[in-house]
Amino acid sequence: MLKNIKSTKRAAPLKKIKTEKELRQLEERYCSFGDTVHYTKHPKFFSNCEGSYLYDEKETPFLDLQMWYSAVNFGYKNTRLSHAAHHQLDTLPQVASQYLHREKVELATMIAKDAEKKWGTKGRVHFNVGGSQAVEDSLKLVRNFSKGKSLMFAFEGGYHGRTLGATSITSSYRYRRRYGHFGDRAQFIEFPYYFRSCACRNFSKPVTPCTNKYSKCYGLKGMSKEEYGSYCVQKFARLFESEYNGIWDPKTRQCEYAAFYVEPILGTGGYVIPPKNFFKELKKVLDEHGILMVVDEIQMGVFRTGKMWAIEHFGVKPDVLVFGKAITNGLNPLSGIWAKEEMINSTIFPPGSTHSTFSSNPMGTAVALETMKMLEEEDYETSVAEKGKYFLEGLKTLKKKHKIIGEVDGLGLALRAEICKEDSYTPDKAMMDWISDEGMKGNILVNGKKYGLVLDVGGYYKNAITFAPSLDISYEEIDLGIRLLDELLRRAEKK
Ligand SMILES: Cc1ncc(COP(=O)(O)O)c(C=O)c1O
């Protein structure tokens, strides 16, 4: 009998596995391209992953230095977090959000208690699925609290997602251009991007007006990074000097804008790290004018910079904080917001204020809860700071060796390198694209073994490598990453 069952199984027709060529033809014909970002003509197929590596069909390891845009902070197939997902799958994988489950409540408690400990502010946590949806929810929360004000400030270079509301506070017009009028488009304020300001350039003769295409010149030559940070805040504060700047009614002391949406470090904008004093000074201006600060931690949160929330480096208390991505290590997605009690209590923000079928889904909350427990038990604050320093040293060595690197910088394991022309300054997007495509070929020989390198590209001129390696990356893997980059830069300079 058993034998029969076995033989029946064997007799089942083998599933025909499609070749890569066939899959590409099907993609070309049946997949929308609108839901993705195809940077290259032929995006690579991957079939496996582990730790810091993605693998193609030939099992070539590709060292990933971007980890799904900083969603997989704890490595692919992280044993502990995958186990939490498997466990939830076997117990309560599905339940509607109108009911409760233990993981949701415990997770919200951990996040809210952590915030209360750090900022002395009581608050609550609200869940959704993707980062953009959480940004949408935060917009509703802010509009509701500020009695219907619908305008926001946000940064030049800021990115908050691509749903309609999130697009309206994201700086790139490119993302709005085809979708009509955005009446609630944010007012975009300069982010202190020191490397591209004339403050940091040692021009032999200051020129007015500035003729340098890639920097802003306000006669700031020789300003330190911190002075430049203060300068940017003062420029913003000038908007409140008189009613004729268009945003402030001095008679009622009312601002037309409800909140300032900030990324502590620009993510898609190129991992630009502001001076230490910047947010403190900015928050002072916001508090003086009754404007909320919403901190978007979707990309920089969950220890990317060596702290749970990147804003902790800058000594300010957020009014609202938005998170997503790495809270579940890129497994079943979960996002959310933490907000101070007066904004989010059940009287002011009652049931149904926002809702999505999958908002506090049990798979996501279970993995996120395990992430939070892991972060309590392990000292990522120290390890990320140390590995980040080591990685940055490697990048500095590369910068000395290769003129086409303009600037390198980093905070924890959020690091950047700008690819430029031979003058180490003029952005070179074409070269950046070439380098990232070359890394995708998977043909760099190290100790007789072939490797590929996965890089993400961002920044104002799309010439910045934005490094977001696994926070569990080993020192040997950092060395390997620097070696692979060195080889790509050598090939780039030779071509
Ligand atoms: C800072 C920031 N906010 C919001 C988002 C949007 O999140 P999602 O892509 O999950 O919708 C992103 C995505 O990269 C982000 O980096």
Image: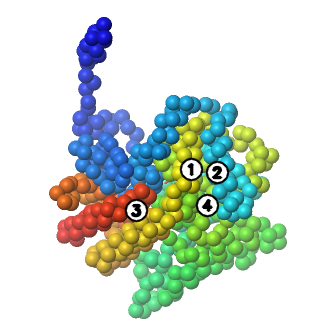
SS for dot 2: helix
Counting other residues with Cα less than 10 Å from the Cα at mark 3, is it few (<14), some (14-19), or many (20 or more)?
many
Counting other residues with Cα less than 10 Å from the Cα at mark 4, is it few (<14), some (14-19), or many (20 or more)?
many
Label 2 – label 4 distance at C-alpha: 19 Å
* Mark 3 or mark 1: whose residue is earlier in sequence: 1
Q: Residue 473: x and y, percent?
A: 39, 58
Locate residue 458: give its quadrant: bottom left
Q: Are discs 3 and 1 less than 8 Å apart at CB?
A: no
Q: Is residue 195 above or below residue 433?
A: below
Residue 373 is left or right of residue 354, and the answer is left
* Mark 3 or mark 2: whose residue is earlier in sequence: 2
Q: Pick the residue in front: 249 or 291.
A: 291
**Residue 373 tag number:** 1
Label 3 – label 1 distance at C-alpha: 26 Å
Q: Residue at x 41, y 88 (%)?
A: 203
Amino acid found under the numbered disc labelled 1: Lys
Which residue reaches farthest right? 251
Q: Residue 324: x and y, percent?
A: 55, 50
Q: Nearer the viewer, mark 1 or mark 2?
A: 1
Q: Are discs 2 and 4 less than 8 Å apart at CB?
A: no
Amino acid found under the numbered disc labelled 2: Met
SS for dot 3: strand
Amino acid found under the numbered disc labelled 4: Val
Q: Are discs 1 and 2 less than 8 Å apart at CB?
A: yes
Q: Residue at x 70, y 58 (%)?
A: 116
Label 3 – label 4 distance at C-alpha: 21 Å
**Residue 295 tag number:** 4
Q: Is residue 304 above or below residue 82?
A: below
Which residue is the site of mark 2?
Answer: 110
Which residue is the site of mark 3?
Answer: 467
* Mark 4 or mark 1: whose residue is earlier in sequence: 4
